[in-house]
Amino acid sequence: MARVTLRLPASLHEALAKRAKEEGVSMNQYLVYTLSKASTLDSVARQRVRFDELLGAVPQDDAEDALRAVLAARAS
């Protein structure tokens, strides 16, 4: 497990400590959860952008055939 030392303004530290207490967890657990959630949301957003790019690259008339081809390739 890695360690990170972080310098925070007192007001932010107090706000984070309050949120952790409201959640019934340590500040470390709260920060790990919050950072993990942000990282996951960022990953999902990037995947969505890539999906939209791929979708835009396939002419709508050919979409069903393209989807079948992708699924067939994945199955083999």
Image (cartoon, rainbow, N blue to C red):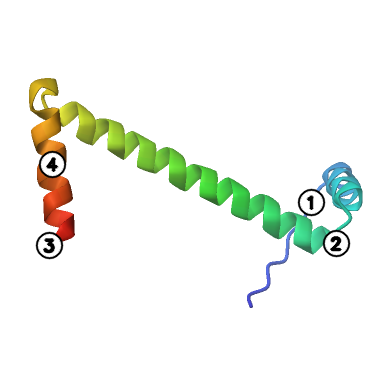
Q: How many marks?
A: 4
The N terminus appears in which quarter of the rendering? bottom right
Q: Residue at x 78, y 63 (%)?
A: 28
Q: Is residue 9 left or right of residue 38?
A: right
Which residue is at a point 17% across and 48% down the rendered structure image? 71
- What residue is rendered at 8% in x and 27% in y? 62
How dense is the environment of label 4, judged by Cα within 10 Å: few (below 14), some, or many (20 and up)? few
Is label 3 in a helix, a strand or a loop? loop
Query: Where is residue 22 drawn, in percent x and y?
Result: 90, 47
For badge 3, the amino acid type reads Ser
Residue 68 placement, left or right of 1: left
Find residue 54 and report its image quarter.
top left
Q: Which residue does the numbered mark 4 point to in the structure image?
A: 68
| Foreground label between 4 and 1 | 4
Q: CA distance from mark 4 to mark 3?
A: 12 Å
Mark 4 residue type: Arg
Crowding near the residue tagged with mark 2, few <14, some 14–19, many ≥20 C-alpha atoms within 10 Å = few
Q: Which residue is mark 3?
A: 76
Disc 2 or 1, which lies upstream in sequence?
Answer: 1
Question: Element under label 4?
Answer: helix
Nearer-the-camera pick, 56 or 13: 56
Query: At which x and y percent is residue 43?
Result: 45, 47
- Which residue position is annotated with label 1? 8
Mark 2–mark 3 distance (CA, rounded to whole Å):
47 Å
| Alpha-carbon span between mark 3 and mark 1 | 52 Å
The residue that disc 2 covers is 26
Q: Residues within 10 Å of mark 3 (few under 14, many from 20)?
A: few
Helix, strand, or loop for circle 2?
A: loop
Residue lying furthest top in this view?
61
Crowding around mark 1 (Cα neighbors within 10 Å: few <14, some 14 to 19, many 20+) is few
